[in-house]
Image: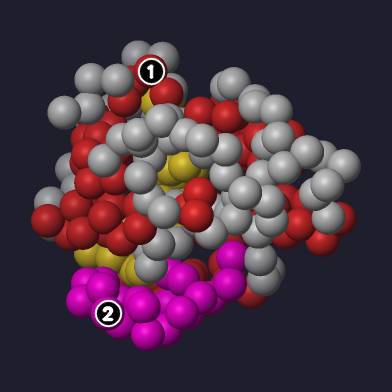
């Protein structure tokens, strides 16, 4: 997909969800370096405070109230919102038969249902500002893998949300980014909800991936497939 419109990030009011995670924290740092004003959203108050950037918003993405907390903080501290970056996510490994029901449920709650709850509440602010949404999915949305069936399905669903919303929000002039990076060294694979990660090749450097994502936001590059990261330095 060709880029739509470029975006000035200096002064932009952006919420980064999952900001205490490895990739989310790097994205937040890169956005701040380019002059953005941030809300950093996550479940752990101490980890958010340790970032030393942005205004912390303690919220659980799996709770429908998270969106209301982000909206309230955006109004109070930023006077609105220009962008939302969803960098939160969980993973699980193993055959589907061996994946517990509660793990399947948690995968979809965090990777799909929570983001939908969040978007329902935040989109009116983004429509006011003609802002943007970034959904960070994964390469498995394009290439589902065995022993990751539920995880692959959850990421494909998140990607589908972005594709549908891109058309749905066209008249509102809200840009929707679908980002599907390849395996990245964030440490997520070492913290699965269940199962054990298969032998994986060396992943991309998380700082390089974060920089590439922020470059794409600035350039209006809304469909960032796994192959778009192959030229990452």
Picture quadrant where residue 81 is located: bottom left
Circle 2: element type: helix
Classify 98 as above or below 45: above
Q: Residue shown at 83%/47% (left/top)?
A: 98
Front residue (pair 84, 129): 84
Q: Which residue is mark 1?
A: 227
Work out whether mark 1 precedes mark 2 in sequence or the reverse, and give the earlier one: 2
Q: Which residue is mark 2?
A: 50
Circle 1: element type: helix
Q: Position of residue 112 (x, y in %)?
A: 67, 48
Q: Residue shown at 49%/42% (left/top)?
A: 135
In magenta, the rendered stretch is: 41-61
Q: Is residue 199 visible?
A: yes
> Quadrant where the C terminus lies?
top left
> Quadrant where the N terminus lies?
top left
Q: Is residue 122 magenta?
A: no
Instruction: For the residues labelled 1 and 2, say whether their Cβ atoms are less than 8 Å apart.
Output: no
Q: Is residue 115 visible?
A: no
Front residue (pair 24, 173): 24
Q: Residue shown at 86%/55% (left/top)?
A: 101
Cα distance, mark 1 to mark 2? Answer: 33 Å
Q: Which mark is residue 168?
A: none
Q: Residue shown at 26%/73% (left/top)?
A: 51
Query: Which residue in the rendered view is the most extreme toward the front?
Result: 199
Query: Which residue in the rendered view is the most extreme toward the bottom?
Result: 46
Picture quadrant where residue 157 is located: top right
Q: Position of residue 14 (x, y in %)?
A: 33, 58
Picture quadrant where residue 212 is located: top left
Classify 170 as above or below 22: above
């Amino acid at each position: 997909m060709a880029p739509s419109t470029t975006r000035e990030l200096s002064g932009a009011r952006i919420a980064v969800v999952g900001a205490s995670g490895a990739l989310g924290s790097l994205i937040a740092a890169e956005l701040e370096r380019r002059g953005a004003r941030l809300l950093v959203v996550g479940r752990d108050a101490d980890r958010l405070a340790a970032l030393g950037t942005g205004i912390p918003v303690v919220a659980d993405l799996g709770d429908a109230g998270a969106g209301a907390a982000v909206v309230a903080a955006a109004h109070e501290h930023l006077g609105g919102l220009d962008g939302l970056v969803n960098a939160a996510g969980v993973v699980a490994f193993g055959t589907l038969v061996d994946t517990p029901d509660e793990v399947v449920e948690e995968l979809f709650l965090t990777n799909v249902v929570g983001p939908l709850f969040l978007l329902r509440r935040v989109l009116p602010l983004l429509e006011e500002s003609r802002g943007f949404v970034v959904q960070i999915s994964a390469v498995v949305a394009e290439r589902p893998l065995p022993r990751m069936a539920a995880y692959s399905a959850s990421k494909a669903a998140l990607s589908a949300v972005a594709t549908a919303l891109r058309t749905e929000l066209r008249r509102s002039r809200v840009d929707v980014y679908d980002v599907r990076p390849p395996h990245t060294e964030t440490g997520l694979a070492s913290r699965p909800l269940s199962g054990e990660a298969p032998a994986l090749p060396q992943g991309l450097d998380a700082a390089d991936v974060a920089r590439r994502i922020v470059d794409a936001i600035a350039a209006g590059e809304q469909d960032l497939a796994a192959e778009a990261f192959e030229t990452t330095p």
